Image (cartoon, grey):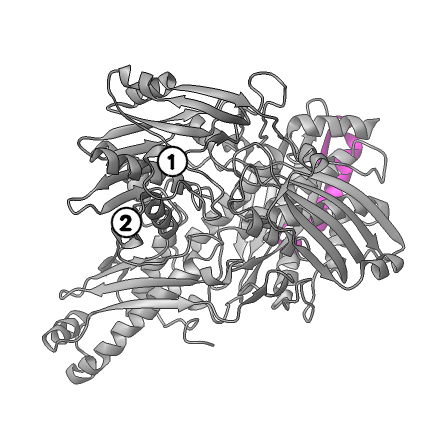
């Protein structure tokens, strides 16, 4: 076992600890960006001048009427930008556009002494528009050839040979919706200019370094003149990886022009209408099976709805293609990908980052095809699971495939799957109006950034003369428990009680050039960097301890080291080894490892309304040797429920009429957009972490947990499919929309009955 993975005796990692800020969260004492803003004297508030059209050219913009509104201080327009008028890394996102590309697109911002003054000022700005044609749906974009960005293609073997060897070939089409992040804290930034002209930005961002870079190039500054701090976030889920940069730049520009602190904080409705979401996808596919139900070939085209600009659509699409196999061996495969350009928000990262969309394609195929092949869906899935020695379509060996089979069998056993299957069959035979469904689905999810360069991290560890320890690292805390894990890593590496270690907020002037806290890699990358810094300090202290003797306390050793002029701080660094990726050829080993999981779900569907209850869920998930079991189980729970929301409840709707409100997001509030609540939680939820699953080469043998559990929710969708099928004749094939809302389920039940 590598030194990075080896755990000492009496380690703090592995202990079930609550979130390090849990008490602050539940008592309301935890400070977030906007809390700091509202305590800042002389604060100005920003409000957008938003487009009322899905697509329109700005013919003229006159800010003068806004200055007649009491309390308005400044109107920000493109003419005020001293640097580059762009908020995206692809240089396709003007901060102050001359052409509005979606309904609600901000073309100017008004600064006021109060938020109400800024709002009234924004309403007073005179804008002349030239409406232009708009494309809103994926089907429209495909029909019109409205595409952007790269068109990757993943291929293995010969699909022609695969289909020739197939005894059953099935074709189909699937469209899946996107998803609103609905983090509790909306986008927020606070910018101020210090006495030497330096810009300090507090921002709710998952990627402080990139926020720093965008602010700098908008202001025409170098990065060392801009500092970005992320205190903590009230949720992110990927929605604060790229999207915060423009809001931070608006705040920073306003602060530079006025010399006063500027706050940008979106309302819930603004946040939903103005920021990107999970990409919706459209897929057409053809699949071939042999007599035993084993997949022989898959041919598909996946189209992602990128919205108006690229944002992260290219890597999202790449990951979707790399996960279209999920946990199944497909010997012959050809999958093409493309990105549609539509006049909607620029869709962005969301937990899973394209993986869920790719995996949903193969799970939908197997769910549809099982009745045609005369096999129970769970048996069809089992027969096609990866085994040791096989590789993914892009050429990466599937290591530890036996863990997938162990998790599968553990779920079958612990959930009493066979007996419950018989009970479901009996219950369905006796009730014509309510039907049950039971399904089991696997997850295989690759862990690392698609872009190899992002797989690096830094940390700064300070040991003070009294023996207390302060840690800075490049990751951001958004409620997922990363800081808790880092405290446990540092305490374990230094052999200290966790109370002796404190974490400081993430800042670009402490740890530079950080990667986003994303791709489920936060603990892997930053944990290894923290451990490296701690190991450096311990190596310097070793001669001092040897001189003092093993009986000397930590505090005595530290004090003696200071008097000996021994350096008591260290900068740690980590880069993930063993990665390779050819994006053009779609070949290589882009992932450090695969995280596995299996879930079984049982549901009951009401044939009168299409409403359903998730009565029980059993999960076994692979997190390696857990750094913090309570945190990890919480992530499995939350990820699963969020995935269930995406697949069964959350229904984004845009106005597709030709009227004046075309392109408006119609589900831009909690009253019109349904996320899971207590009433949708499974009646019984049993979660176990896979044992004997340590991962060598990763910090203390752990594995990532942020994204993979979301895909465990496929089990709920497939259980709903089985329940709906029970309303029809034996062997009925259910075409289930995504999301499978109660309304959609009711229509599927009607189709089954007919």
Q: Quadrant of residue 119?
A: top left
Mark identifier at residue 226: 2
Residue 223 on the magenta segment: no
**Badge 2: residue crowd in 10 Å (few <14, some 14–19, many ≥20):** many
- Write the residue at 61% across / 64% down: 403
Give the residue pinned by disc 1: 185
- Write the residue at 34% across / 38% down: 81
Q: Considering the numbered disc 2 on the image, is that residue within a helix, a strand or a loop? A: strand
- Tell me whether circle 1 and circle 2 mark residues in contact (CB < 8 Å): no
Q: Quadrant of residue 61?
A: top left
**Badge 1: residue crowd in 10 Å (few <14, some 14–19, many ≥20):** many
Bounds of the magenta segment: 411-436
Residue 441 picture location, percent across and down: 66, 50
Mark identifier at residue 68: none
**Quick check: 500 above or below 99?**
below
The disc, 1 or 2, on the residue closer to the chain's N-terminal end is 1
Residue 422 on the magenta segment: yes
Asked whether, in this view, residue 493 is left or right of residue 609, the answer is left
Residue 6 picture location, percent across and down: 42, 73
């Amino acid at each position: 076992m590598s030194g990075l993975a080896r755990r000492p005796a009496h380690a703090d990692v592995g202990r079930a600890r609550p979130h390090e800020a849990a008490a602050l969260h539940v008592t309301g004492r935890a400070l977030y960006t906007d809390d700091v803003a509202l305590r800042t004297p002389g604060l100005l508030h920003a409000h957008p001048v938003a487009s009322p059209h899905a697509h329109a050219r700005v013919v003229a913009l006159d800010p003068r009427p806004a200055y007649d509104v009491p309390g308005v201080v400044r109107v920000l327009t493109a003419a005020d930008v001293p640097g580059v008028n762009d908020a995206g890394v692809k240089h396709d996102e003007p901060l102050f556009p001359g052409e509005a590309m979606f309904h609600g697109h901000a073309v100017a911002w008004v600064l006021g002494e109060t938020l109400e003054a800024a709002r009234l000022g924004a309403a007073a700005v005179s804008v002349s528009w030239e409406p232009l044609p708009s494309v809103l749906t994926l089907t429209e974009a495909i029909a019109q050839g409205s595409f952007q960005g790269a068109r990757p293609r993943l291929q293995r073997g010969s699909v022609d040979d695969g289909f020739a060897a197939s005894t059953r070939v099935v074709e189909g089409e699937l469209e899946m919706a996107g998803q609103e992040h609905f983090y509790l804290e909306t986008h927020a930034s606070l910018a101020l200019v210090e006495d030497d002209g330096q810009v300090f930005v507090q921002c709710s961002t998952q990627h402080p370094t990139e926020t720093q870079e965008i602010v700098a190039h908008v202001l025409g500054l170098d990065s060392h003149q801009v500092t970005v701090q992320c205190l903590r976030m009230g949720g992110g889920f990927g929605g604060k990886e790229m999207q915060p940069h423009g809001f931070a730049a608006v705040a920073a520009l306003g602060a530079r022009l006025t010399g006063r602190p500027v706050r940008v904080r979106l309302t819930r409705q603004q946040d939903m209408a103005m920021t990107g979401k999970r990409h919706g996808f459209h897929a057409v596919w053809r699949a071939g099976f042999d007599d035993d139900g084993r997949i022989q070939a898959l041919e598909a085209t996946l189209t992602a709805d990128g919205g108006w600009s690229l944002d992260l659509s290219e890597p999202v699409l790449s990951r979707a293609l790399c996960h279209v196999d999920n946990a199944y061996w497909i010997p012959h495969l050809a999958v093409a990908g493309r990105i549609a350009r539509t006049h909607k928000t620029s869709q962005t990262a969301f937990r899973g980052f394209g993986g869920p969309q790719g995996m949903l394609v193969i799970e939908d195929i197997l769910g549809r095809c099982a009745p045609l092949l005369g096999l129970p869906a769970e048996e069809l899935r089992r027969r096609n699971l990866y085994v040791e020695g096989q590789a993914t379509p892009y050429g990466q060996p599937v290591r530890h495939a036996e863990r997938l089979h162990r998790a599968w069998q553990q779920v079958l056993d612990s959930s009493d799957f066979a007996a419950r299957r018989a009970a479901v069959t009996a219950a369905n035979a006796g009730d014509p109006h309510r039907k049950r469904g039971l399904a089991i689905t696997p997850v295989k999810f690759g862990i690392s950034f698609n872009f190899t360069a992002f797989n690096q991290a830094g940390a700064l560890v300070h040991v003070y003369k009294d023996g207390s320890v302060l840690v800075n690292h490049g990751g951001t805390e958004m409620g997922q428990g990363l800081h808790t894990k880092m405290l446990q890593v540092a305490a374990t590496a230094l052999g200290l009680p966790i109370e002796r270690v404190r974490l400081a907020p993430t800042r670009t002037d402490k740890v530079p050039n950080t990667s986003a806290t994303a791709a489920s890699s936060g603990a892997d990358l930053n944990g290894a960097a923290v451990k490296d810094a701690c190991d450096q300090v311990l190596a310097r202290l070793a001669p001092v301890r040897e001189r003092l003797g093993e009986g000397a306390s930590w505090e005595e050793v530290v004090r003696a080291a200071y008097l000996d002029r021994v350096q008591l701080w260290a900068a740690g660094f980590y880069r993930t080894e063993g990665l390779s990726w050819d994006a053009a050829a779609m070949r290589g080993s882009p992932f450090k490892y695969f995280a596995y999981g299996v879930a079984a779900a049982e549901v009951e569907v009401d044939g009168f309304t299409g409403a359903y209850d998730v009565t029980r869920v059993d999960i076994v998930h692979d997190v390696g040797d857990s750094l913090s079991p309570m945190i990890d189980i919480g992530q499995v729970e939350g990820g699963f429920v969020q995935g269930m929301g995406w697949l069964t409840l959350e229904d984004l709707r845009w106005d597709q009429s030709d009227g004046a409100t075309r392109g408006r997001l119609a589900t831009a509030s909690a009253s019109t957009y349904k996320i899971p609540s207590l009433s949708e939680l499974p009646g019984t939820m049993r979660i176990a972490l896979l044992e004997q699953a340590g991962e060598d080469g990763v910090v203390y043998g752990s594995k990532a947990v942020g994204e993979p559990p979301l895909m465990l929710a496929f089990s709920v969708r497939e259980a709903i499919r089985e329940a709906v099928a029970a309303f029809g004749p034996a062997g009925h094939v259910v075409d289930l929309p995504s999301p499978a809302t109660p309304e959609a389920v009711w229509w599927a039940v009607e189709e089954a009955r007919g």
